[in-house]
Amino acid sequence: MIKSRLVKSLPVILLLIAGSKAYSQLPAVITEHFNALSKHDVKAIAAGYADSAKVYSPNWEGAKTGPPGVTEVYTRYFSSTPDLFYNITHIINAGENIVVEYTSGGTLSNPESGTPDYMKGKRYTVNYCAIFTIKNRKITRESDYFDQVAFLRQVGFFDQH
């Protein structure tokens, strides 16, 4: 009787083990992603995204798509803020989704065209929250949130208005 129950339960047990192993690999994908961010390695960052990945941020109109969109964004970020840093403060593993709270900042040394002159040379540090969806060890979706008012305060926006 016990042997019969064990045999019937075995497929469920194996499925749970396989599923937990797949989900346990997800934080490694995030660690690799943030290591590449810290090194400003745009090629490695882009390689972590699926071709059809969608990345959302309040910084842009609409989504950026796949490695080309990610390459464009991070090339701009690392150019405008050459000392840009990233520090993870908390990770929540929720199945195929990972929530990451982190701090990022640096000095706005080379502002993009259209950026007001008073922002040049300003240091900033901002708290972020990002939600990643990961499938087959690739990021398929990322939504980023940050305190835009804190950023604007630190780069002098409210001193001008």
Image (cartoon, rainbow, N blue to C red):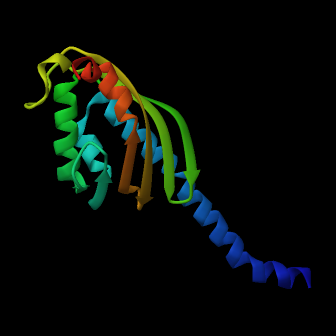
Residue at 48% from the left image edge and 45% from the top image edge: 28
Asked whether, in this view, residue 92 is left or right of residue 123, the answer is right
Q: How many numbered callouts? A: 0
Q: Position of residue 150 (x, y in %)?
A: 38, 27
- Residue drawn at point x = 25 percent, y = 34 percent: 41
Relative depth, front residue between 67 and 61? 61
For this view, does 64 lie left or right of residue 116? right
Judging depth in this view, the residue of 9 and 87 nearest the camera is: 87
Percent x, y of residue 113:
7, 31
- The residue most toward the right is 1
Q: Quadrant of residue 19?
A: bottom right
Asked whether 125 or 68 is in front, the reply is 125
Quarter of the picture containing the N terminus is: bottom right
| Residue 85 in sight in this render | no
Which quarter of the image is occupied by the C terminus? top left
Task: Say whether residue 91 is visible.
Answer: yes
State which quadrant residue 16 falls in. bottom right
Q: Residue at x 69, y 75 (%)?
A: 12
Q: Seen from this angle, which residue lies furthest top?
A: 121
Relative vertical location of residue 17 with respect to residue 93 in this rendering, above or below: below
Residue 128 figure quarter? top left
**Residue 5 location (% of width, % of height):** 84, 82
Find the residue positioned furthest to the front.
161
Say left or right for 152 vs 115.
Answer: right
